[in-house]
Amino acid sequence: MTEPNAYAMAGVDIHAADRAVDLMKTWVEKARRPEMVGGLGGFAGLFDASALTAYKRPLLATSTDGVGTKVAVAQMMDKHDTIGFDLVGMVVDDLVVCGAEPLFMTDYIATGQVVPERIAAIVKGIAEACIEAGCALVGGETAEHPGLLAPHEYDVAGATTGVVEADDLLGPGRVRPGDVVVAMASSGLHSNGYSLARNVFFTQAGWTVDRDVPELGRTLGEELLEPTRIYTKAGLALARETETHAMAHITGGGLANNLARVMPVELAATLDRATWTPGPVFDLVRQVGSVPQPDLEATLNCGVGMVALVAPDSVDAALALLSGLGVDAWVAGEVVVDPRQKGSVELVGQHPGW
């Protein structure tokens, strides 16, 4: 009988980590692009950048993020194959807003105990989301941290790199008075505001993940674990095929604060809440937790996961394009000249039924 080595006695199972790598190889292999060099297992992921010679002035864009406390819901549900969509969505769509195509991604998983099947499920979700976003998963790292994390606990993070032609860069410098705000529906909470949602549902209300919620048409856990919608292909299509001047990914900070990040200081945007009805989960957070609407809007996406600032004569084409790609979209407001606002975004009116 083989005696455990000192590292195993300290709580780190190298053999489990090796098995996790074996299980995830199939999924990583699916998330390839032709520019990938080599396979899983090297010290660094390699990506052939010779394609960038076709650009006149290529700008590299990079983004890094995690999924916050949504991982706690995945752990409560013991369902780990969708959290990767949240991770990928958070990073790739931060690139898309400037018109950059995501090229490749790396991930990092820290856990209290490596359970190979759980790690493989997480990576499966990441790989499937990379396929949907059109980027390659070139590598990653799994770290076992006994004593820092409980055996069932884990956290995930990732980083991605993309490219955009300098002349095609989207942002505040392109925004003009009269631009139309086209809103794109979110699939739910996405990956922001889960500390608020968890406090409302689990701490204040005492609900559990297996509670059937009639307003949601499913259990609370199923709703909270709904994967983040990935807008990459839709956003890149808007940038290529319409006169889109800027985009904003609606993550932490909510709709107004994120849209303000791409507004020039001499302009402002006004959005009408009456143009959409947030999904039931947002109203539940508001009512069950008695959360004031300003706090809700500063924390959650409230039904809008991405917005585009589009020239007026491109709006019809933009809406048709998004519809064809299966993205619900609508006109939510416009860009105006208002020296008093100083690049701010104002929400007016009220959501139907609120």
Image (spheres, rainbow, N blue to C red):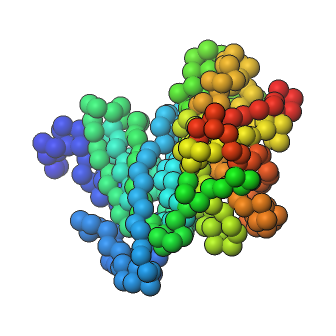
Q: Determine the residue positioned at 29% across, 47% down.
A: 143
* Spot occupied by residue 326 in the image (x, y as percentages of width and height): 76, 61
Tag count: 0
* Spot occupied by residue 47 in the image (x, y as percentages of width and height): 35, 74
Q: In this orientation, does residue 35 appear? A: no
Residue 19 vertical position relative to residue 13 in the rendered view, above or below = below
Q: In this orientation, does residue 289 appear? A: yes
* Spot occupied by residue 173 in the image (x, y as percentages of width and height): 55, 57
Towards the viewer: 1 or 32: 32
The answer to which quarter of the image holds residue 50 is bottom left
Q: Quadrant of the C terminus?
A: top right
Q: Is residue 9 left or right of residue 167?
A: left
Q: Is residue 166 left or right of residue 285?
A: left
Q: Determine the residue positioned at 72% across, 34% down.
A: 347
* Spot occupied by residue 93 in the image (x, y as percentages of width and height): 55, 56
Q: Determine the residue positioned at 62% across, 56% down.
A: 175
